[in-house]
Amino acid sequence: MTIKRIDRELCDSCGICLDSCPDDVIRFDGEDKAVIVYPADCQTCFLCEEDCPRAAIEVAPEILPVPRPY
């Protein structure tokens, strides 16, 4: 599994998804938009999707996220 998509129109370059990804899967491209650079390393943890304030990221919708262990 991996991130299904990042909507470039919704992405406002806040960087929250970069900070929330434990595996450094997401980076900024030359236009400062979030892109998936290492899809094979994605753990499908849903942290990027949950933390994105603009709902620009969609992770494998056919499975449920694992709850965070606070």
Image (cartoon, helix red, strand yellow):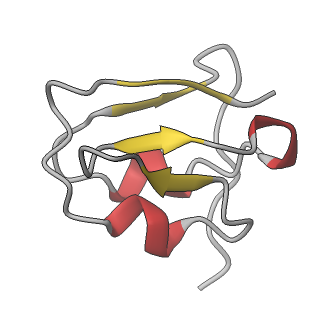
Q: Where is residue 38 in the image (x, y as percent from the top left)?
A: 75, 45
What residue occupies the far front of the structure in this picture?
30
Q: Please tell me whether residue 31 is drawn above or below residue 56 in the rendered image.
A: below
Residue 1 falls left or right of residue 24: right
Residue 37 falls left or right of residue 33: right
Rendered residue at 41%/51% (across/down): 50
Residue situated in front as seen by the camera: 27 or 54: 27
Give the quadrant of residue 22.
bottom right
Rendered residue at 73%/31% (across/down): 2
What residue occupies the far right of the structure in this picture?
40
Rendered residue at 77%/46% (across/down): 42
Q: Position of residue 5 (x, y in %)?
A: 48, 22
Residue situated in front as seen by the camera: 49 or 64: 49
Rendered residue at 71%/24% (across/down): 63
Residue 50 falls left or right of residue 54: right
Q: Position of residue 57 (x, y in %)?
A: 39, 34
Residue situated in front as seen by the camera: 11 or 1: 11
Which quarter shows the N terminus? top right
What residue occupies the far bottom of the structure in this picture?
70
Q: Please tell me whether residue 35 is drawn above or below residue 4 in the rendered image.
A: below
Q: Please tell me whether residue 52 is drawn above or below residue 5 in the rendered image.
A: below
